[in-house]
Amino acid sequence: MDARPILFFDSGVGGLSIVGPTRAAMPNAPFVYAADSAGFPYGVKSAGEIAARVPALLGRLAERYRPRLIVIACNTASTIALPAVRAALDLPVVGTVPAIKPAAALSTTRVIGVLGTEATVAQRYVDDLSARFAGDCLVIRHGSAELVELAEQKLRGRRVEPERYAAVLDGLFGRPGGERIDVVVNACTHFPLVEAELAAAAPRPMRFIDGGEGIARRIAALCGDASRPERAPPGVAVFTRLGDGERELAPALAARGFPTIEAL
């Protein structure tokens, strides 16, 4: 029996949107959730800072938890640091990328929105995805650090005014051609956590899409058919800084299978 955990890594709670579909695909697998709360948020950091920070942290986490596979459940960290992490660690590493390909397949107006962090939407990787899979589409991007904070506040049980979601979406729909957007890519793992709020705030019915289901299938395929416990063991959540703000997340983490919180 392979009791090694799958380790999910993000700057905050966004990676929980990847945990959900992965747990559905692998209900008995042991999980560790790691959040770099001391470095949060990644979306406003330079590429150099992220490229230096993420491989070092994942090296420490791999030494402590001995995972069978690591998921960089963060679009910003994946687009910047994934090659360096794979080069440094001798185990499978799965990244997350914006779901531009499936969005282009769904769009009838041929105008799609990409909603991510400032760091993600500025990456050349997004240019490449758009050129390869959405070459006949107008791709409108908007980076929002505020939406990351709104998702974090939601999981802390704090109330957020609906107008704040509408203001974020105006960064997409208010751009030239934005009135024709019919599919929005949630290109930050935090954003599926507030998809219902975004849909309610949108000026018209809208499809929101993310890569969570596809990433879960990839994780399951890489883990193969190794036997696992008959019942999922309690998950562990680990933070690089453990203070009152992180402890506020305890109910949301416990509800998602992580009753234990540790500091790295």
Image: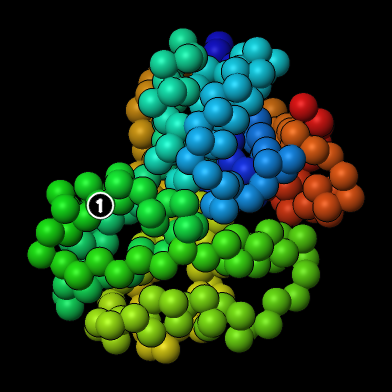
Hey, which quadrant is residue 215 in on the image? top left
Q: Where is residue 193 in the image (x, y as percent from the top left)?
A: 57, 61
Give the residue at the far right of this rendering: 244
The residue sitting at 60% across, 18% down in the picture is: 59
* Residue 214 against residue 113 in the figure, above or below: above
Q: Nearer the viewer, residue 191 or 117?
A: 117
Q: Residues within 10 Å of mark 1 (few under 14, many from 20)?
A: few
* Residue 133 against residue 71 in the figure, above or below: below
Tag 1: amino acid: Asp
Q: Position of residue 5 (x, y in %)?
A: 60, 23
Q: Nearer the viewer, residue 44 or 107?
A: 44
How many numbered marks, from 0 up?
A: 1
The structure's colour scheme is rainbow
- Quadrant into which the N terminus falls: top right
205 sits left or right of 116 in the view: left
212 sits left or right of 145 in the view: left
- Quadrant into which the C terminus falls: top right
199 sits left or right of 5 in the view: left
Q: Which of 58 and 206 is in front in this view?
A: 58
Q: Where is residue 84 in the image (x, y as percent from the top left)?
A: 43, 23
The answer to whether residue 248 shows anywhere in this view is yes
The residue tagged 1 is 127
The residue sitting at 30% across, 69% down in the picture is: 140
Q: Which of 6 and 51 is in front in this view?
A: 51
The residue sitting at 20% across, 62% down in the picture is: 104
The answer to whether residue 6 shows anywhere in this view is no
- SS assignment at label 1: helix
* Residue 262 against residue 115 in the figure, above or below: above
The residue sitting at 28% across, 78% down in the picture is: 181
Q: Position of residue 105 (x, y in %)?
A: 18, 61
